[in-house]
Image (cartoon, grey):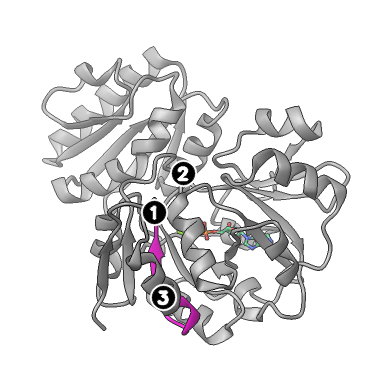
Amino acid sequence: MQTIHWIIKDITKKDHAIKEAGSVIAQGGLVAFPTETVYGLGANALDGQAVKSIFQAKGRPADNPLIVHVATIEEIAKVSSKCTETAHKIMQAFWPGPLTLVLPKTDSVPKEVTCGLDTVAVRMPNHPVALKLIMEAGVPVAAPSANLSGSPSPTTAQHVIDDLEGRINGVLDGGPANLGVESTVLDISNEIPIILRPGGVTAEQLEEVIGPVRHYKGLENHHSQISPRSPGMKYKHYSPKAGIILIEGQAEDIVLHTKELINRYQKENKKVGVLSSEESAHNYPGTEVLHYGKRNNPASAAAVLYAALRSFDLLGVDIIIAEGMPETGLGKAVMDRLKRAASSVVRL
Ligand code: AMP
Ligand code: MG
């Protein structure tokens, strides 16, 4: 299959690329598109066959359900039968934006989208290209991240091409995704809402609008056999080819331990990559250092995290040592992704 590369020139003018991409989706094809979180791989959410081809293109496990993307609040009626007051409050506050709600599903949502669950995950992305594409397609769009399953999520059209060229109908290039981590997935079916996956909207922001929320704790360990509430959470995710050792603790302790590990691996003739904060990057000469910005600026870390993990692959490092950051605000999502990507976690 030839993958068309549409470059968006001016979203304010009539952009034929988006119209064309929308009709590809309407006809059952697969189109990757930019959102504010990461690039998504979209198909008509009401067409089971089209949705099935997303799983094939990505090599995604068949029991990991997809998020359905809508362009208007009214469009939710096509996929969900019941929207509570809390749901509306959350939509008003956070849509369009990086917040996914798990809602009861209608019969028109095929089992391929939800992997047989009786709920459907829905969000409205905050990106002009994504919103226009959904409008042009005329249907809700099911879309996971547009990468090969297991590898770091794509934050540029080039990342999508590197992973999926020849496996999808096209990619809309709207520049880099600026947030850089996926949406927060929220379950509001209990009295106290549960964050199933931390993401772009923080627990602190949610609590300002709906009061206390809880973090889903049932699956800290992705090797667990327990049937998870948010099925995608049981898989190891977001990993570059080299193993990652994630180090958590106070900044000074992390630096000391990282130096020790570098020594150890260099003695074994291994090429070491370090993902560090900007403040401590100078501590690791003789390694491939990529920094994620200031230790207390998780927004900067989120924006560069996946691109950095992909760069380590291109640099051909044998092992990556990653400095952890505080889990406040967006730091929670950054650390969640790093823990899922890591082959081991050291807590100092
Ligand atoms: P991805 O598309 O790879 O960003 O992952 C989508 C996330 O949403 C995964 O963690 C899924 O498990 C979660 N998800 C999708 N649908 C549902 C649902 N109906 N109930 C709970 N979690 C869901
Ligand atoms: Mg994904």
Q: Where on the image, by quarter, is ligand 1?
A: bottom right
Q: How many other residues sit within 10 Å of disc 2, few (<14), some (14-19) or many (≥20)?
A: many
The amino acid marked with disc number 2 is: Val
Q: Secondary structure at mark 2?
A: loop
Camera-near label (1 vs 3) is 3
Q: Is residue 132 left or right of residue 300?
A: right
Q: Report the residue marked by disc 1.
A: 153
Q: Is residue 68 left or right of residue 90?
A: left
- Mark 2 vs mark 1: which is more N-terminal? 1
Q: Is residue 26 magenta?
A: yes
Q: Is mark 1 within 8 Å of ligand 2?
A: yes
Q: Which residue range is magenta in the image?
A: 25-34
Write the residue at 36% across / 19% down.
294
Give the camera-side residue of 171 and 332: 171
Q: Is mark 3 within 8 Å of ligand 1?
A: no
Labels 2 & 1 near each other (Cβ < 8 A): yes
The amino acid marked with disc number 1 is: Ser
Specify the quadrant of the image occupied by residue 251: top left
Cα gap from disc 2 to disc 1, whole angstroms = 8 Å
Q: Residue furthest front?
A: 13
Task: Give the quarter of the figure containing the N terminus.
Answer: bottom left
Cα gap from disc 1 to disc 3, whole angstroms = 17 Å
Labels 1 & 3 near each other (Cβ < 8 A): no
Q: Is residue 148 visible?
A: no
Q: Is mark 2 within 8 Å of ligand 1?
A: no
- Mark 1 vs mark 3: which is more N-terminal? 3
Across and down, in percent, residue 40 comes to: 44, 60
Q: Report the residue marked by disc 2.
A: 181
Across and down, in percent, residue 165 comes to: 25, 71
| In this view, 61 is above or below 162 | below
Q: Secondary structure at mark 3?
A: loop
